[in-house]
Image (cartoon, rainbow, N blue to C red):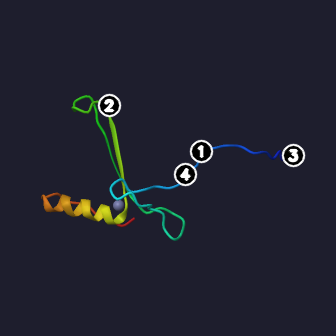
Amino acid sequence: MKIIGITEKEDLIDIVCDICGKSTKTEFDDYEYAELSARWGYSSSKDEEYHEVCLCEKCYDQVTSYIESIGGKVTIRSY
Ligand SMILES: [Zn+2]
């Protein structure tokens, strides 16, 4: 037997870029974004903090360009 009723539940509405604020939703109803995160431990000055940022592709490209401009390397692999 199916019992039908109205329920309230939390659901994902959107994922927006933390730099430009634009939606990362694509024309195919999925999301394209980078999620950068850091979990800081006891030995750091940010003990027990979790940092997270979501970036759209354009802002991600700017961030990775900056990383490379200061000598860093972004590893790219196919999956
Ligand atoms: Zn952005």
Residue type for callout 4: Leu
Q: Is residue 34 above or below residue 8?
A: below
Q: Is mark 4 within 8 Å of ligand 1?
A: no
| Mark 1 to mark 2 CA distance (whole Å) | 27 Å
Residue 73, image x and y in percent? 19, 59
Residue at the spot of label 4: 12
Name the element at disc 4.
loop
Disc 3 is placed on an element classified as: loop
Q: CA distance from mark 4 to mark 2?
A: 26 Å
Three-letter residue code for mark 2? Glu
Give x and y (percent) for residue 69. Answer: 14, 62
Mark earlier in primary sequence (2, 3): 3
Q: Quadrant of residue 9?
A: top right
The percent coordinates of residue 50 (x first, y second) are 34, 38
Question: Quick one: label 3, few (<14), some, or many (20+) residues within 10 Å?
Answer: few
Q: Are marks 4 and 2 in contact (CB under 8 Å)?
A: no
Label 2: state its secondary structure: loop
> Looking at the picture, which amino acid does disc 1 mark?
Glu
Q: According to the image, label 3 marks what residue?
A: 1
What residue is at 36 percent from the left and 67 percent from the top? Answer: 78
The residue pinned by badge 2 equals: 48
Q: Mark 3 vs mark 4: give the one in front.
A: 4
- The residue tagged 1 is 10
